[in-house]
Image (cartoon, helix red, strand yellow):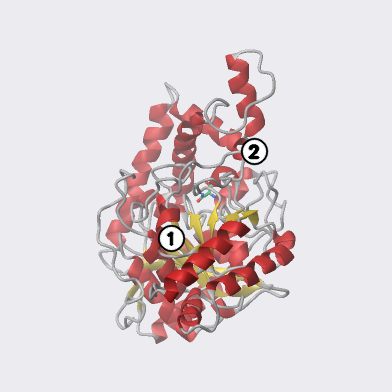
Amino acid sequence: MHQLTLAEIARGLADKSFSSEELTRTLLERINQLDPQLNSFISVTEELAISQARAADARRAAGDNGPLLGAPIAHKDLFCTQGIRTSCGSKMLDNFKAPYDATVVSKLAEAGTVTLGKTNMDEFAMGSANESSHYGAVKNPWNLEHVPGGSSGGSAAAVAARLLPATTGTDTGGSIRQPAALTNLTGLKPTYGRVSRWGMIAYASSLDQGGPLARTAEDCALMLQGMAGFDAKDSTCIDEPVPDYSAALNGSLEGLRIGLPKEYFGAGLDPRIADLIQASVKELEKLGAVVKEISLPNMQHGIPAYYVIAPAEASSNLSRFDGVRFGYRCENPADLTDLYKRSRGEGFGPEVQRRIMVGAYALSAGYYDAYYLQAQKIRRLIKNDFMTAFNDVDVILGPTTPNLAWKIGAKNNDPVAAYLEDVYTITANLAGLPGLSMPAGFVDGLPVGVQLLAPYFQEGRLLNVAHRYQQVTDWHTRAPNGF
Ligand code: GLN
């Protein structure tokens, strides 16, 4: 039963091959058995899951047949869940039980999903390897010595290991797409404003966006349907009608114009990954797509701009964790200043402290114009590049990551080396565009992802391309040994 996709689960539940409670119990047992190898969960919510599964079975018996009704999922541990620890991967929030559900959590619960738990993540979603969690590193099920990517690494590892069919993640600079690529999943970062950020613990508010991780585009469509939509509680959530994403999956790719940015295929890209990306382009050409070389001339400025803007916003967002209002408080503070200093110094890990310091520096008087304002100008140039490119093409295709999943610890002494892994994903966040990563093959037994980007609100187009590709390839169906 653990091999089933969300779409298959929906069919199995509808024709009564099994109940949600049976499925939920099977998966909970699998998590108990296998997760100690992976460390993909921070909390397993067994009681909640059983009660939600029973409620879903009762709803179904009463005639409800929604596509997510009774489907087991898990949430990245930065989505607030009422009465359940919401740690954000940090010692700072180890004892924090959220007083309310994030909009994404409540929307998916209304659709009938069953929450199996909260998944491990880089502390405050800062990272590309899921090594900075207070709860320890997450292992990649394709090779337990390698990272699963980050920051939604727990969400990715759990789905890749068939512990459950789908999870939520968040993507500030690539944290859905990059772990999807490194674990052989399909992951979608929606347009900024498509999914409510209310109740998502903020990292960099102008970049953060929630989205799904699953094994297929078909399942991402089901998840996005449950997550997307206007929410008055998030002032940046956009009031656009939500299309039927599943209905868009089978559209023809005849004449689809694919742009290949020449900047994506230069130095820094593992040539074995480049070969697999070219092979995926060939498959799409067979389906009728036409390919065009394009240019995104400001792409190389993405990383420096992002690593000013994201820490700047983080330094502001994380000021609320002061030892008074939320989470960790140091022992026996001498006075108020000591309380602030030690609560933050002891509660935050080294990567989070580094980002807060970089951000506070970039925002300080005298440096604001030189760094933050400059980075915002670059952000606009990057957006303009995409707008120009989308005049000529329908989607932009390239690698999701320049390298394969690296060995745990390999980049620990060089934070900038890890930052460079975000080179292909970060620009979509700076521009607010939707992006998807899907499986494109393997090198040395490790998965490779291909990334697709589309104009604003064209998530349906991304899912359509990925679904058609997945009908003629089988990379996405492959499971790691032992799982
Ligand atoms: N790796 C990037 C960072 O560390 C992106 C993280 C994310 O998308 N949450 O900031």
Quadrant of the frame with the N terminus:
bottom right
Q: In the picture provided, is 397 more to the left or to the right than 40?
A: left
Question: Residue 120 at what x, y percent from top left?
Answer: 62, 53
Question: Residue 391 at what x, y percent from top left?
Answer: 25, 64
Q: Is mark 1 within 8 Å of ligand 1?
A: no
Res 477 label: none
In this rendering, the count of numbered labels is 2
Question: Residue 174 at what x, y percent from top left?
Answer: 49, 55
Q: In the picture provided, is 224 more to the left or to the right than 384?
A: right
Quadrant of the frame with the C terminus:
bottom right
- Between disc 1 and disc 2, the foreground one is 1
The kind of secondary structure element at disc 2 is: helix
Question: Residue 418 at what x, y percent from top left?
Answer: 60, 50
Residue sitting at x 29%, y 46%: 232
Give the answer, above or below, for where 319 lies relative to 194.
Answer: above
Q: Which badge, 1 or 2, is on the more N-terminal residue? A: 2
Q: Which residue is mark 1?
A: 108
Q: Which residue is mark 2?
A: 91
Q: Is mark 2 within 8 Å of ligand 1?
A: no
Residue type for callout 2: Lys
- Mark 1 Cα-neighbour bin, 10 Å: few <14, some 14–19, many ≥20: many
Front-most of residues 294 and 283: 283
Front-most of residues 133 and 13: 13
- Mark 2 Cα-neighbour bin, 10 Å: few <14, some 14–19, many ≥20: some
Q: CA distance from mark 1 to mark 2?
A: 27 Å
The kind of secondary structure element at disc 1 is: helix
Residue type for callout 1: Leu
